[in-house]
Image (tube, helix red, strand yellow):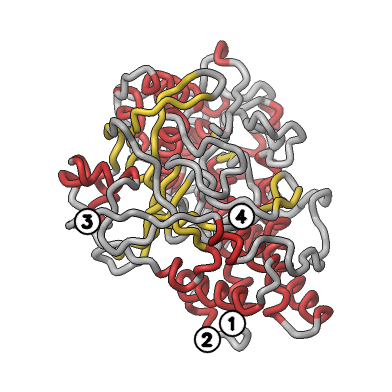
Protein backbone atom coordinates (compact mmCIF):
# COMPACT_ATOMS: atom_id res chain seq x y z
CA UNK A 1 0.00 0.00 0.00
CA UNK A 2 2.76 2.45 0.81
CA UNK A 3 5.79 1.51 -1.22
CA UNK A 4 4.89 -0.92 -3.95
CA UNK A 5 3.09 -0.34 -7.23
CA UNK A 6 1.98 -2.94 -9.77
CA UNK A 7 3.63 -2.37 -13.12
CA UNK A 8 0.88 -3.24 -15.56
CA UNK A 9 -0.13 0.39 -16.23
CA UNK A 10 3.33 1.96 -16.32
CA UNK A 11 4.93 3.04 -19.59
CA UNK A 12 7.94 5.14 -20.42
CA UNK A 13 7.37 8.72 -21.43
CA UNK A 14 7.28 8.83 -25.19
CA UNK A 15 6.09 10.85 -28.13
CA UNK A 16 2.45 9.91 -28.52
CA UNK A 17 1.40 13.11 -30.20
CA UNK A 18 1.76 14.43 -33.70
CA UNK A 19 0.58 17.74 -35.08
CA UNK A 20 -2.84 18.03 -36.61
CA UNK A 21 -4.50 15.16 -34.73
CA UNK A 22 -7.26 17.38 -33.37
CA UNK A 23 -9.43 20.13 -34.81
CA UNK A 24 -7.84 23.59 -34.52
CA UNK A 25 -9.45 26.85 -33.55
CA UNK A 26 -10.91 27.40 -37.01
CA UNK A 27 -12.75 24.09 -36.82
CA UNK A 28 -14.21 24.94 -33.43
CA UNK A 29 -15.40 28.36 -34.59
CA UNK A 30 -17.23 26.78 -37.48
CA UNK A 31 -19.49 24.88 -35.09
CA UNK A 32 -19.91 27.57 -32.44
CA UNK A 33 -22.77 29.97 -31.83
CA UNK A 34 -22.77 33.32 -30.11
CA UNK A 35 -23.91 33.42 -26.48
CA UNK A 36 -26.87 35.60 -25.58
CA UNK A 37 -26.08 37.28 -22.23
CA UNK A 38 -28.80 38.88 -20.16
CA UNK A 39 -27.95 41.53 -17.54
CA UNK A 40 -27.41 40.15 -14.06
CA UNK A 41 -26.86 43.10 -11.70
CA UNK A 42 -25.27 41.42 -8.71
CA UNK A 43 -22.58 39.23 -10.26
CA UNK A 44 -19.50 39.89 -12.38
CA UNK A 45 -17.96 37.03 -14.31
CA UNK A 46 -14.49 37.28 -15.74
CA UNK A 47 -13.45 35.55 -18.94
CA UNK A 48 -9.73 35.12 -18.53
CA UNK A 49 -9.70 31.56 -19.89
CA UNK A 50 -11.67 32.57 -22.98
CA UNK A 51 -9.47 35.64 -23.52
CA UNK A 52 -6.10 33.96 -23.08
CA UNK A 53 -6.91 30.64 -24.74
CA UNK A 54 -9.63 31.30 -27.35
CA UNK A 55 -8.53 28.24 -29.34
CA UNK A 56 -9.78 26.10 -26.45
CA UNK A 57 -13.06 27.97 -25.90
CA UNK A 58 -16.20 27.61 -28.01
CA UNK A 59 -18.74 30.39 -27.34
CA UNK A 60 -22.01 28.71 -26.45
CA UNK A 61 -25.14 29.13 -24.40
CA UNK A 62 -27.10 26.93 -22.06
CA UNK A 63 -30.35 25.27 -23.03
CA UNK A 64 -33.52 26.74 -21.59
CA UNK A 65 -34.74 25.49 -18.22
CA UNK A 66 -38.55 25.59 -18.55
CA UNK A 67 -39.32 25.35 -14.82
CA UNK A 68 -36.19 25.96 -12.73
CA UNK A 69 -36.46 24.95 -9.09
CA UNK A 70 -33.65 25.05 -6.54
CA UNK A 71 -32.89 21.62 -5.09
CA UNK A 72 -29.69 22.34 -3.16
CA UNK A 73 -27.61 25.41 -2.35
CA UNK A 74 -24.31 25.58 -0.46
CA UNK A 75 -24.84 28.83 1.42
CA UNK A 76 -21.36 28.66 2.98
CA UNK A 77 -19.76 28.49 -0.46
CA UNK A 78 -22.01 31.27 -1.75
CA UNK A 79 -20.82 33.49 1.10
CA UNK A 80 -17.19 32.66 0.29
CA UNK A 81 -17.84 33.81 -3.25
CA UNK A 82 -19.60 37.00 -2.16
CA UNK A 83 -22.92 35.86 -3.64
CA UNK A 84 -26.23 36.83 -2.07
CA UNK A 85 -28.16 33.66 -1.25
CA UNK A 86 -31.56 35.37 -1.38
CA UNK A 87 -30.73 36.62 -4.88
CA UNK A 88 -29.57 33.14 -5.91
CA UNK A 89 -32.96 31.76 -4.87
CA UNK A 90 -34.78 34.32 -7.02
CA UNK A 91 -35.49 34.27 -10.76
CA UNK A 92 -32.24 35.92 -11.86
CA UNK A 93 -30.22 33.79 -9.46
CA UNK A 94 -31.79 30.61 -10.79
CA UNK A 95 -31.09 31.94 -14.28
CA UNK A 96 -27.42 32.28 -13.41
CA UNK A 97 -27.32 28.80 -11.88
CA UNK A 98 -28.80 27.30 -15.05
CA UNK A 99 -26.86 29.53 -17.45
CA UNK A 100 -29.99 31.09 -18.93
CA UNK A 101 -29.45 34.53 -17.35
CA UNK A 102 -25.82 35.64 -17.34
CA UNK A 103 -24.29 38.95 -16.32
CA UNK A 104 -23.61 41.58 -18.94
CA UNK A 105 -20.16 41.07 -20.42
CA UNK A 106 -19.95 37.37 -19.56
CA UNK A 107 -18.58 35.01 -22.21
CA UNK A 108 -19.96 31.51 -21.69
CA UNK A 109 -17.88 28.84 -23.41
CA UNK A 110 -17.53 25.10 -23.79
CA UNK A 111 -13.96 24.03 -23.12
CA UNK A 112 -11.95 21.76 -25.41
CA UNK A 113 -9.88 18.86 -24.09
CA UNK A 114 -8.82 15.35 -24.96
CA UNK A 115 -8.44 12.35 -22.70
CA UNK A 116 -7.26 8.82 -22.20
CA UNK A 117 -10.40 6.94 -21.22
CA UNK A 118 -9.65 3.52 -19.74
CA UNK A 119 -6.28 3.71 -21.47
CA UNK A 120 -7.55 4.60 -24.95
CA UNK A 121 -6.91 8.07 -26.33
CA UNK A 122 -9.92 10.14 -27.39
CA UNK A 123 -8.57 13.22 -29.20
CA UNK A 124 -11.70 15.37 -28.98
CA UNK A 125 -13.79 15.23 -25.83
CA UNK A 126 -14.53 18.66 -24.35
CA UNK A 127 -17.54 19.97 -22.46
CA UNK A 128 -20.24 17.92 -24.13
CA UNK A 129 -22.88 18.88 -21.58
CA UNK A 130 -21.18 21.65 -19.67
CA UNK A 131 -20.31 25.32 -19.88
CA UNK A 132 -17.81 27.61 -18.24
CA UNK A 133 -19.85 30.68 -17.29
CA UNK A 134 -16.71 32.53 -16.27
CA UNK A 135 -14.47 33.30 -13.31
CA UNK A 136 -15.62 34.72 -9.99
CA UNK A 137 -13.35 36.77 -7.78
CA UNK A 138 -14.63 36.43 -4.22
CA UNK A 139 -13.89 38.56 -1.17
CA UNK A 140 -10.65 36.60 -0.63
CA UNK A 141 -9.41 37.69 -4.07
CA UNK A 142 -9.02 34.12 -5.34
CA UNK A 143 -10.20 33.43 -8.87
CA UNK A 144 -12.61 30.51 -9.22
CA UNK A 145 -14.53 29.05 -12.14
CA UNK A 146 -18.30 28.96 -12.18
CA UNK A 147 -19.15 26.01 -14.37
CA UNK A 148 -22.33 24.19 -15.29
CA UNK A 149 -22.96 20.51 -15.81
CA UNK A 150 -26.06 19.26 -17.59
CA UNK A 151 -26.70 22.57 -19.36
CA UNK A 152 -27.41 21.11 -22.80
CA UNK A 153 -25.66 19.90 -25.92
CA UNK A 154 -22.51 21.59 -27.18
CA UNK A 155 -20.36 20.88 -30.26
CA UNK A 156 -18.49 18.38 -28.08
CA UNK A 157 -21.59 16.34 -27.21
CA UNK A 158 -20.62 13.38 -29.46
CA UNK A 159 -24.22 12.23 -29.87
CA UNK A 160 -25.22 12.75 -26.24
CA UNK A 161 -28.24 14.78 -25.19
CA UNK A 162 -26.18 17.20 -23.10
CA UNK A 163 -28.50 16.86 -20.15
CA UNK A 164 -28.21 15.50 -16.63
CA UNK A 165 -30.65 13.89 -14.23
CA UNK A 166 -31.44 14.96 -10.68
CA UNK A 167 -29.80 11.90 -9.07
CA UNK A 168 -26.27 12.18 -10.52
CA UNK A 169 -26.15 15.94 -9.97
CA UNK A 170 -27.19 15.57 -6.35
CA UNK A 171 -24.62 12.78 -5.97
CA UNK A 172 -21.92 15.27 -6.92
CA UNK A 173 -23.40 17.77 -4.47
CA UNK A 174 -23.41 15.25 -1.63
CA UNK A 175 -19.98 13.72 -2.23
CA UNK A 176 -18.12 16.93 -3.06
CA UNK A 177 -19.57 18.52 0.09
CA UNK A 178 -18.31 15.56 2.10
CA UNK A 179 -14.86 15.70 0.49
CA UNK A 180 -14.54 19.40 1.30
CA UNK A 181 -15.54 18.76 4.91
CA UNK A 182 -12.93 15.99 5.09
CA UNK A 183 -10.29 18.52 4.04
CA UNK A 184 -9.63 16.94 0.64
CA UNK A 185 -9.04 19.35 -2.28
CA UNK A 186 -12.13 19.26 -4.45
CA UNK A 187 -14.33 21.07 -6.89
CA UNK A 188 -17.45 22.12 -5.03
CA UNK A 189 -21.15 22.15 -5.74
CA UNK A 190 -22.65 25.61 -5.37
CA UNK A 191 -26.15 24.50 -6.32
CA UNK A 192 -28.31 21.93 -8.04
CA UNK A 193 -31.34 23.22 -9.93
CA UNK A 194 -34.12 21.12 -11.39
CA UNK A 195 -34.77 22.27 -14.94
CA UNK A 196 -38.30 21.04 -15.55
CA UNK A 197 -37.01 18.95 -18.45
CA UNK A 198 -37.24 15.19 -18.69
CA UNK A 199 -34.10 13.14 -19.34
CA UNK A 200 -34.19 9.75 -21.03
CA UNK A 201 -31.84 7.19 -19.50
CA UNK A 202 -32.91 3.62 -18.69
CA UNK A 203 -36.15 5.35 -17.66
CA UNK A 204 -37.44 8.90 -17.95
CA UNK A 205 -35.94 11.01 -15.15
CA UNK A 206 -36.28 14.60 -13.99
CA UNK A 207 -33.50 16.83 -15.31
CA UNK A 208 -31.14 19.07 -13.36
CA UNK A 209 -28.12 21.34 -13.73
CA UNK A 210 -25.17 21.40 -11.35
CA UNK A 211 -23.41 24.72 -10.75
CA UNK A 212 -19.84 23.79 -9.87
CA UNK A 213 -17.02 25.91 -8.49
CA UNK A 214 -13.36 25.07 -9.04
CA UNK A 215 -9.96 26.70 -8.93
CA UNK A 216 -10.14 26.04 -12.66
CA UNK A 217 -11.19 23.29 -15.03
CA UNK A 218 -7.75 22.84 -16.57
CA UNK A 219 -7.09 19.13 -16.92
CA UNK A 220 -4.35 16.83 -18.09
CA UNK A 221 -6.66 16.36 -21.07
CA UNK A 222 -6.55 20.09 -21.77
CA UNK A 223 -2.79 19.88 -22.22
CA UNK A 224 -3.15 16.74 -24.32
CA UNK A 225 -5.62 18.44 -26.66
CA UNK A 226 -3.36 21.45 -27.02
CA UNK A 227 -0.29 19.33 -27.76
CA UNK A 228 -2.23 17.41 -30.38
CA UNK A 229 -2.98 20.61 -32.31
CA UNK A 230 0.75 20.91 -32.99
CA UNK A 231 0.63 24.61 -32.10
CA UNK A 232 3.62 25.22 -29.86
CA UNK A 233 2.64 28.80 -29.08
CA UNK A 234 -0.75 27.63 -27.83
CA UNK A 235 0.89 24.96 -25.68
CA UNK A 236 3.20 27.57 -24.17
CA UNK A 237 0.31 29.97 -23.50
CA UNK A 238 -1.67 27.19 -21.82
CA UNK A 239 1.29 26.28 -19.62
CA UNK A 240 1.78 29.96 -18.70
CA UNK A 241 -1.92 30.23 -17.88
CA UNK A 242 -1.73 27.15 -15.64
CA UNK A 243 1.37 28.45 -13.86
CA UNK A 244 -0.19 31.85 -13.20
CA UNK A 245 -3.47 30.32 -12.08
CA UNK A 246 -2.26 27.44 -9.90
CA UNK A 247 1.49 27.13 -9.49
CA UNK A 248 3.00 30.64 -9.46
CA UNK A 249 6.13 29.45 -7.68
CA UNK A 250 7.07 27.62 -10.89
CA UNK A 251 7.48 31.01 -12.58
CA UNK A 252 10.60 31.61 -10.48
CA UNK A 253 12.01 28.21 -11.37
CA UNK A 254 15.04 28.14 -13.67
CA UNK A 255 12.87 25.98 -15.97
CA UNK A 256 9.25 27.13 -15.37
CA UNK A 257 7.57 24.41 -17.42
CA UNK A 258 9.51 21.72 -15.62
CA UNK A 259 8.45 23.46 -12.43
CA UNK A 260 4.84 23.21 -13.59
CA UNK A 261 5.16 19.48 -14.25
CA UNK A 262 6.80 18.88 -10.89
CA UNK A 263 4.10 20.91 -9.13
CA UNK A 264 1.25 18.96 -10.74
CA UNK A 265 2.98 15.67 -9.92
CA UNK A 266 3.27 16.77 -6.30
CA UNK A 267 -0.30 17.98 -5.81
CA UNK A 268 -1.75 14.90 -7.49
CA UNK A 269 0.40 12.56 -5.38
CA UNK A 270 -0.86 14.23 -2.22
CA UNK A 271 -4.46 14.26 -3.46
CA UNK A 272 -4.56 10.54 -4.23
CA UNK A 273 -2.93 9.78 -0.87
CA UNK A 274 -5.82 11.62 0.78
CA UNK A 275 -8.34 9.61 -1.25
CA UNK A 276 -6.70 6.40 -0.15
CA UNK A 277 -6.70 7.45 3.50
CA UNK A 278 -10.49 7.87 3.58
CA UNK A 279 -11.30 4.92 1.30
CA UNK A 280 -12.56 7.05 -1.59
CA UNK A 281 -12.80 5.38 -5.01
CA UNK A 282 -13.06 7.88 -7.86
CA UNK A 283 -14.21 5.30 -10.38
CA UNK A 284 -13.26 7.04 -13.63
CA UNK A 285 -9.68 8.33 -13.41
CA UNK A 286 -9.38 9.26 -17.08
CA UNK A 287 -6.87 11.97 -17.94
CA UNK A 288 -9.73 14.40 -18.60
CA UNK A 289 -10.72 13.88 -14.97
CA UNK A 290 -7.34 14.88 -13.52
CA UNK A 291 -6.94 18.58 -12.78
CA UNK A 292 -3.77 20.63 -12.95
CA UNK A 293 -4.81 22.33 -9.71
CA UNK A 294 -4.85 19.12 -7.67
CA UNK A 295 -8.59 19.24 -6.97
CA UNK A 296 -10.87 16.21 -7.21
CA UNK A 297 -13.20 16.58 -10.18
CA UNK A 298 -16.19 14.70 -11.64
CA UNK A 299 -18.08 12.59 -9.11
CA UNK A 300 -19.69 10.15 -11.49
CA UNK A 301 -19.34 6.47 -10.52
CA UNK A 302 -17.56 7.32 -7.27
CA UNK A 303 -18.15 5.72 -3.87
CA UNK A 304 -16.54 5.08 -0.50
CA UNK A 305 -15.08 1.67 0.22
CA UNK A 306 -16.58 -0.07 3.25
CA UNK A 307 -14.98 -3.50 3.77
CA UNK A 308 -11.28 -3.05 3.09
CA UNK A 309 -10.22 -4.65 -0.18
CA UNK A 310 -7.72 -3.11 -2.63
CA UNK A 311 -9.65 -4.64 -5.56
CA UNK A 312 -12.81 -2.71 -4.70
CA UNK A 313 -14.57 -1.37 -7.82
CA UNK A 314 -17.96 0.33 -7.97
CA UNK A 315 -18.19 1.62 -11.54
CA UNK A 316 -20.42 -0.34 -13.89
CA UNK A 317 -18.05 0.27 -16.80
CA UNK A 318 -14.80 -0.64 -15.02
CA UNK A 319 -15.04 -4.34 -15.79
CA UNK A 320 -11.28 -4.90 -15.62
CA UNK A 321 -10.74 -3.07 -12.35
CA UNK A 322 -8.40 -0.50 -13.87
CA UNK A 323 -9.63 2.15 -11.45
CA UNK A 324 -9.99 -0.08 -8.39
CA UNK A 325 -9.20 1.43 -5.00
CA UNK A 326 -5.71 -0.10 -4.81
CA UNK A 327 -4.81 0.91 -8.37
CA UNK A 328 -5.48 4.62 -7.92
CA UNK A 329 -1.85 5.63 -7.21
CA UNK A 330 -0.69 3.65 -10.24
CA UNK A 331 -3.27 5.21 -12.52
CA UNK A 332 -2.44 8.69 -11.24
CA UNK A 333 1.21 8.10 -12.14
CA UNK A 334 0.20 6.79 -15.57
CA UNK A 335 -1.95 9.87 -16.17
CA UNK A 336 0.90 12.16 -15.16
CA UNK A 337 3.12 10.40 -17.69
CA UNK A 338 0.59 11.47 -20.33
CA UNK A 339 0.88 15.05 -19.05
CA UNK A 340 4.65 14.81 -19.32
CA UNK A 341 4.36 13.56 -22.90
CA UNK A 342 2.23 16.53 -23.82
CA UNK A 343 4.67 19.01 -22.25
CA UNK A 344 7.81 17.58 -23.90
CA UNK A 345 8.31 20.40 -26.43
CA UNK A 346 8.44 22.91 -23.57
CA UNK A 347 10.99 20.95 -21.53
CA UNK A 348 13.83 20.92 -24.05
CA UNK A 349 14.42 21.39 -27.76
CA UNK A 350 16.01 17.94 -27.88
CA UNK A 351 13.30 15.31 -27.62
CA UNK A 352 15.74 12.84 -26.10
CA UNK A 353 16.75 15.32 -23.42
CA UNK A 354 13.11 16.33 -22.85
CA UNK A 355 12.19 12.70 -22.20
CA UNK A 356 15.03 12.40 -19.68
CA UNK A 357 13.85 15.55 -17.90
CA UNK A 358 10.22 14.41 -17.85
CA UNK A 359 11.11 10.94 -16.62
CA UNK A 360 13.10 12.42 -13.76
CA UNK A 361 10.19 14.67 -12.81
CA UNK A 362 7.76 11.75 -12.89
CA UNK A 363 10.08 9.91 -10.54
CA UNK A 364 9.00 12.33 -7.86
CA UNK A 365 5.48 10.90 -7.82
CA UNK A 366 6.26 7.73 -5.90
CA UNK A 367 8.35 9.59 -3.35
CA UNK A 368 5.67 12.24 -2.83
CA UNK A 369 2.83 9.72 -2.72
CA UNK A 370 4.64 7.41 -0.32
CA UNK A 371 5.48 10.29 2.01
CA UNK A 372 1.91 11.64 1.93
CA UNK A 373 0.23 8.28 2.42
CA UNK A 374 2.66 7.23 5.15
CA UNK A 375 1.99 10.47 6.99
CA UNK A 376 -1.77 10.05 6.57
CA UNK A 377 -1.58 6.56 8.06
CA UNK A 378 0.65 7.81 10.87
CA UNK A 379 -2.01 10.35 11.78
CA UNK A 380 -4.85 7.83 11.40
CA UNK A 381 -3.10 5.52 13.83
CA UNK A 382 -2.31 8.40 16.19
CA UNK A 383 1.44 7.88 16.18
CA UNK A 384 3.87 10.71 16.92
CA UNK A 385 5.55 12.86 14.25
CA UNK A 386 9.13 11.94 13.58
CA UNK A 387 8.57 8.22 14.05
CA UNK A 388 11.14 6.41 11.91
CA UNK A 389 9.82 4.98 8.65
CA UNK A 390 11.45 1.64 9.36
CA UNK A 391 9.15 1.38 12.40
CA UNK A 392 6.00 2.98 10.99
CA UNK A 393 5.85 1.51 7.50
CA UNK A 394 6.08 -2.20 8.47
CA UNK A 395 3.55 -1.67 11.27
CA UNK A 396 1.02 -0.07 8.93
CA UNK A 397 1.65 -2.61 6.17
CA UNK A 398 0.96 -5.46 8.62
CA UNK A 399 -2.46 -4.01 9.40
CA UNK A 400 -3.81 -4.25 5.85
CA UNK A 401 -4.01 -8.07 5.57
CA UNK A 402 -5.71 -8.19 8.97
CA UNK A 403 -8.40 -5.81 7.74
CA UNK A 404 -8.75 -7.52 4.39
CA UNK A 405 -9.07 -11.06 5.70
CA UNK A 406 -11.71 -9.94 8.19
CA UNK A 407 -13.66 -7.80 5.69
CA UNK A 408 -13.34 -4.98 8.19
CA UNK A 409 -15.06 -1.68 7.54
CA UNK A 410 -12.32 0.90 6.83
CA UNK A 411 -14.00 3.96 8.32
CA UNK A 412 -15.45 2.25 11.40
CA UNK A 413 -12.19 0.49 12.26
CA UNK A 414 -10.02 3.59 12.37
CA UNK A 415 -12.60 5.59 14.29
CA UNK A 416 -12.91 2.77 16.84
CA UNK A 417 -9.13 2.43 17.07
CA UNK A 418 -9.00 5.54 19.24
CA UNK A 419 -10.94 3.59 21.89
CA UNK A 420 -8.14 1.03 21.85
CA UNK A 421 -5.65 3.86 22.38
CA UNK A 422 -7.69 4.81 25.46
CA UNK A 423 -7.51 1.25 26.77
CA UNK A 424 -10.67 -0.37 25.38
CA UNK A 425 -9.79 -2.63 22.46
CA UNK A 426 -13.08 -4.52 22.35
CA UNK A 427 -14.72 -2.34 19.67
CA UNK A 428 -11.95 -3.15 17.17
CA UNK A 429 -11.52 -6.73 18.36
CA UNK A 430 -15.22 -7.27 17.67
CA UNK A 431 -14.66 -6.52 14.00
CA UNK A 432 -12.00 -9.19 13.40
CA UNK A 433 -12.39 -12.98 13.37
CA UNK A 434 -8.73 -13.95 13.74
CA UNK A 435 -7.75 -12.13 16.93
CA UNK A 436 -4.18 -13.35 17.36
CA UNK A 437 -2.56 -11.18 14.64
CA UNK A 438 -4.71 -8.19 15.64
CA UNK A 439 -3.84 -8.50 19.34
CA UNK A 440 -0.16 -8.76 18.47
CA UNK A 441 -0.46 -5.67 16.28
CA UNK A 442 -2.32 -3.73 18.96
CA UNK A 443 0.33 -4.51 21.55
CA UNK A 444 3.15 -3.20 19.36
CA UNK A 445 1.09 -0.18 18.32
CA UNK A 446 0.17 0.80 21.88
CA UNK A 447 3.84 0.64 22.88
CA UNK A 448 4.45 3.59 20.52
CA UNK A 449 2.09 5.87 22.47
CA UNK A 450 -0.83 6.65 20.11
CA UNK A 451 -2.75 9.88 20.75
CA UNK A 452 -6.48 9.06 20.84
CA UNK A 453 -7.66 12.65 20.66
CA UNK A 454 -5.48 13.31 17.61
CA UNK A 455 -6.94 10.22 15.97
CA UNK A 456 -10.49 11.49 16.43
CA UNK A 457 -9.54 14.68 14.62
CA UNK A 458 -8.52 12.81 11.43
CA UNK A 459 -10.68 9.67 11.40
CA UNK A 460 -14.24 10.54 10.36
CA UNK A 461 -17.34 9.14 11.98
CA UNK A 462 -19.42 9.92 8.92
CA UNK A 463 -18.66 9.43 5.23
CA UNK A 464 -21.20 9.15 2.39
CA UNK A 465 -22.33 5.61 3.08
CA UNK A 466 -23.36 4.11 -0.23
CA UNK A 467 -26.74 2.81 0.88
CA UNK A 468 -27.64 6.17 2.42
CA UNK A 469 -26.58 8.03 -0.71
CA UNK A 470 -28.74 5.80 -2.88
CA UNK A 471 -31.74 6.09 -0.55
CA UNK A 472 -31.39 9.88 -0.53
CA UNK A 473 -31.03 10.15 -4.32
CA UNK A 474 -33.98 7.86 -4.94
CA UNK A 475 -36.10 9.97 -2.62
CA UNK A 476 -34.99 13.20 -4.30
CA UNK A 477 -35.75 11.80 -7.75
CA UNK A 478 -39.25 11.04 -6.46
CA UNK A 479 -39.59 14.59 -5.13
CA UNK A 480 -38.56 14.27 -1.46
CA UNK A 481 -35.42 16.31 -0.71
CA UNK A 482 -35.46 15.63 3.04
CA UNK A 483 -33.04 12.66 3.02
CA UNK A 484 -30.48 14.53 0.90
CA UNK A 485 -30.68 17.60 3.12
CA UNK A 486 -30.23 15.53 6.29
CA UNK A 487 -27.33 13.56 4.79
CA UNK A 488 -25.52 16.71 3.68
CA UNK A 489 -26.02 18.26 7.12
CA UNK A 490 -24.39 15.21 8.75
CA UNK A 491 -21.50 15.13 6.29
CA UNK A 492 -20.61 18.78 6.87
CA UNK A 493 -19.15 17.80 10.27
CA UNK A 494 -17.64 14.35 9.64
CA UNK A 495 -15.42 14.20 12.74
CA UNK A 496 -18.02 15.18 15.34
CA UNK A 497 -19.85 12.19 16.76
CA UNK A 498 -23.44 13.18 17.51
CA UNK A 499 -26.14 11.28 19.38
CA UNK A 500 -29.04 10.06 17.30
CA UNK A 501 -26.98 9.77 14.11
CA UNK A 502 -25.77 6.22 14.60
CA UNK A 503 -27.45 5.11 11.36
CA UNK A 504 -25.26 7.52 9.40
CA UNK A 505 -22.10 5.93 10.79
CA UNK A 506 -23.07 2.30 10.24
CA UNK A 507 -21.99 0.23 7.21
CA UNK A 508 -24.60 -0.94 4.75
CA UNK A 509 -26.92 -3.71 5.98
CA UNK A 510 -26.22 -7.22 4.63
CA UNK A 511 -29.23 -7.10 2.31
CA UNK A 512 -27.81 -4.05 0.49
CA UNK A 513 -25.69 -6.42 -1.61
CA UNK A 514 -22.89 -5.43 -3.98
CA UNK A 515 -22.95 -1.78 -4.99
CA UNK A 516 -22.69 -0.52 -8.56
CA UNK A 517 -22.47 3.10 -9.65
CA UNK A 518 -23.08 4.69 -13.04
CA UNK A 519 -21.78 7.75 -14.89
CA UNK A 520 -25.23 9.26 -15.34
CA UNK A 521 -24.88 9.90 -19.08
Q: Earlier in the sequence, mark 1 or mark 4?
A: 1
Q: Is residue 394 left or right of residue 64?
A: right
Nearer the camera: disc 2 or disc 4: 2
Measure the C-alpha gap from mark 2 to mark 4.
Answer: 30 Å
Identify the secondary structure beneath mark 4: helix
In the rendering, at what x and y percent does residue 125 appear? Answer: 62, 51
Q: Are marks 1 and 2 in contact (CB under 8 Å)?
A: yes
Question: Residue 494 falls in which quadrant of the image?
Answer: top left
Residue at numbered disc 3: 39
Q: Earlier in the sequence, mark 1 or mark 3?
A: 3
Residue at numbered disc 4: 374
Nearer the camera: disc 1 or disc 4: 1
Identify the secondary structure beneath mark 3: loop
Q: Residue at x 28, y 49 (%)?
A: 101
Nearer the camera: disc 2 or disc 3: 3
Q: Is residue 265 visible?
A: no
Q: Residue at x 20, y 41 (%)?
A: 91
Residue at numbered disc 1: 256
Vertical position of residue 520 compared to residue 377: above or below: above
Measure the C-alpha gap from mark 1 to mark 4.
Answer: 29 Å
In the rendering, at what x and y percent does residue 20 appear? Answer: 73, 66
Residue at numbered disc 2: 252
Identify the secondary structure beneath mark 2: helix
In the rendering, at what x and y percent does residue 398 appear? Answer: 70, 42
Amino acid sequence: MIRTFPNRYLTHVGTAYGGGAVGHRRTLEEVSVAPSPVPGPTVRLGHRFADELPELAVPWQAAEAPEPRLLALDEELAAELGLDTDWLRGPDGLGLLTGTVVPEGARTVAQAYSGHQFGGFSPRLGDGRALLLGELSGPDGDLRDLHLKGSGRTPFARGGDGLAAVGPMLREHVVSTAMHALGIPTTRSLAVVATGRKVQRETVLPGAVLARVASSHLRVGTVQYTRATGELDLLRRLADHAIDRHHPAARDDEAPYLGLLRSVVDVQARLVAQWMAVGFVHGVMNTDNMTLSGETIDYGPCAFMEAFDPTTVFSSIDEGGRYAYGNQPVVAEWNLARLAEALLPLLDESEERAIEIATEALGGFRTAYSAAFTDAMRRKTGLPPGLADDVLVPLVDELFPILRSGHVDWTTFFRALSSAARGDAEPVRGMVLDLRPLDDWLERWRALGPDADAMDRVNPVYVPRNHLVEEALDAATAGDLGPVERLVDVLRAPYDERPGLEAYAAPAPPDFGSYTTYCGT
